[in-house]
Image (cartoon, coloured by chain):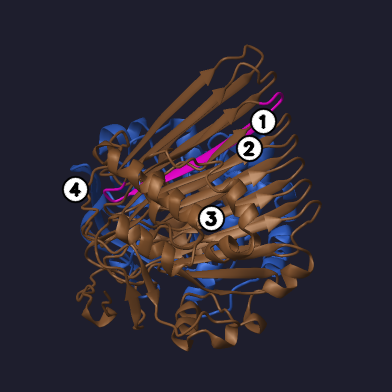
Amino acid sequence: MLEIKNLHATVDGKDILRGVDLTINAGEVHAIMGPNGSGKSTLSYALAGREGYEVTDGEVIYDGRDLLAMAAEERAQAGVFLAFQYPVEIPGVAMSTFLRTAVNAMRRARGEDELDAIKFLKLARAKMAELEMDEKFLGRAVNVGFSGGEKKRNEVFQMAMLDPRFAVLDETDSGLDIDALKIVADGVNALRGPDRAMLVITHYQRLLDYIVPDRVHVLAKGRIVKSGGRELALELEANGYAEFDSAA
Amino acid sequence: MVASVETLKTVEDVSGGDYKYGFVTDIDSEFAPKGLNTDIVRFISAKKGEPDWLLDWRLRAFEMWQRSAAEEPSWANVKYAPIDFQDAYYYAAPKQAEAPKSLDEVDPELLETYEKLGIPLKEQEMLAGVAVDAVFDSVSVATTFKKKLHEVGVIFCPISEAVRDHPELVRKYLGSVVPVADNFYATLNSAVFSDGSFVYIPKGVRCPMELSTYFRINAAETGQFERTLIVADEGSYVSYLEGCTAPMRSEHQLHAAVVELVALEDAEIRYATVQNWYPGDAEGRGGIYNFVTKRGACRGARSRISWTQVETGSAITWKYPSVILQGDDSVGEFYSVALTANHQQADTGTKMIHIGRNTRSTVISKGISAGHGQQTYRGLVRVQGGADQARNYTQCDSLLIGDKCGGHTVPYIEVRNHKARVEHEATTSKIDDDQLFYCRQRGLSDEEAVSLIVNGFCKEVMQKLPMEFAVEAQKLLGISLEGAVG
């Protein structure tokens, strides 16, 4: 589904990604772990198409398409979802308005009919129940005054509503207590399926106790330096990243 | 004496096609000669068959204006080349053999114009529950639902007709809120005002439908000087809407209106404006100078006046819809969304004058600047010595899009009563890249994202608009912001 080849990217003229190679098939969940500053967030932004994250070399093929040639909203409409590490506040815009606009933008792009307010509400309520979210959520302004846990849960809720094909979860575990972490992980696990792929970016292996990945990769200094199965995460927890910091 | 529209120049090459009301109606018009002098004042008055007292009133105003001609106000935070008041027409009216007695007699060309503007004047096609007075250049061309309103005693007609049919009311209230000597443009308006609407709601009557005036400038090089007077007698209620558009032209046109509202005991007036005069092109050529004086007087106890405005048009806007809170326990409100994009400038705000005891006022102002737009909120809250327990709450928020625009806030607060409470809050924010990217990652285009954020920013004010207009106003904001990003 996703093939990253020799991806190089700079931010403010600084080389951050220095040749990332990664292939993710439909149905798989991959985890990327790595120390701070290894380029984890840059990779997620480069995949999502954020301005200022300049790809200088390499390519990304998504469902047979050249992902890097697409605008950020085109990638989203094609099914690429990013759960933000720091979800952004939009004062005055109710969650329901925001999300309905987003859902309908996706549906329009796919040539489907837009959801009216009633159908939208029905869908939203069902998804919120799964994530144990209060319905009042829909009336609140996007991320404004949300606790850390609420913000992350909101990202997973949006993912459930937008039904992506490929989702990147950027440190979705940070700032969550253990109960919130379980709920978020349950939400993510519910979305696992043969047609969907996920890339879970995390600093700690704790999240991977709940979202069990098919593959684990270590990103250090802008390259994937080691790949393995689930056990690699446990190894990292025991030994830390020191070995990669010096090796790379 | 008479020029025809065919001779008038229009913009040949319109670069920004976003302004969809920019067309010109090809209709034979009658003009007063260019320029301004006592003959013109007499001409306008004669055209309308006015009584002597009104002609005298105009002439006095003109004399006063001439004396103050050197004192064109310069304190507003707007920049423009000096206006040559002699180089404009002060009266333009579509030629008609006789004034139409009913809608069936209105020139089809005019009906079509309003149709194109989204204001059908045929009653069966209209928004149910909205009566419309259509003002085209200097005259009112049609007023709908007159009969239905007449049944409950509501008077809704062109002001020139009111002068003729209800002189006692007009004479009593005209200039009673905005005196002739009030300011440079109000004085000018008093001398040369052409048409506008007159509304009278009798005692205890709740006006059964929304009243609305639609102002259209069509003729070139012509100023529009409408005069609107609304009187709500004791215990009555009225909700009134006005809309404005003009063709796209490369020269500037002056629009200097005066609106006066009078609310007697227990009466309530809600006045909403959706102002979309031609704003000029992307380089700042052309557009309307919108220099307007709007003021309401809460004369009676427990009366209420509320101004709601959505201002997206005009090259320059200069207006401060105000409320004089004279009656005890009276309430004044001002809700405003003003947008300046491209090279638009606006200096706008309100004045709340607390005179009576226990008077309350609320001011919510939302200013949006994009492109090279410059916007100033200028607001006065004055509490007089006798206004015990007066309360004011002011909130003015500015939203900036891009880095070449400006938002400024100039509050004036004068409190002469120590039992009064006045609160002022102001914020300035910017639509930032994080917000845009967040929205785009959810599948929205830049423009959809900006429109969503802007509408969220303005929500408190939009909710105050009558429903029929809220949707329209929201679309208008979207259109006006097209191309504002990137």
The type of residue carrying mark 1 is Arg
Chain shown blue: that is A
Check disc 1: other Cα within 10 Å, few if <14, some if 14-19, many if 20+.
many
**Cα gap from disc 3 to disc 2, whole angstroms:** 19 Å
> The disc numbered 1 marks a residue on which chain?
B
Question: Where does the image place residue B420, in percent across and percent down from the top left?
Answer: 64, 18
Q: How far apart are marks 1 and 4 (CA)?
A: 40 Å
Give the spatial CA distance, label 1 vs label 3.
Answer: 25 Å
Residue hosting label 4: B81
User: Does B242 sit above or below residue A38?
Assistant: below
Is circle 1 on the same chain as circle 3?
yes
Q: Which of A244 and B40 is in front in this view?
A: B40
Of marks 1 and 2, which one's residue comes earlier in the chain?
Answer: 2
Mark yes or no: residue B318 visible.
Answer: no
Q: SS class of the residue under badge 3?
A: strand
What's the colour of chain B in the image? brown
Pointer 3 residue: B228
CB within 8 Å, label 1 to label 2: yes
Q: For this view, does B60 lie left or right of residue B422?
A: left
Q: Magenta stretch?
A: B356-373
Residue at screen point 60% across, 29% down = B393
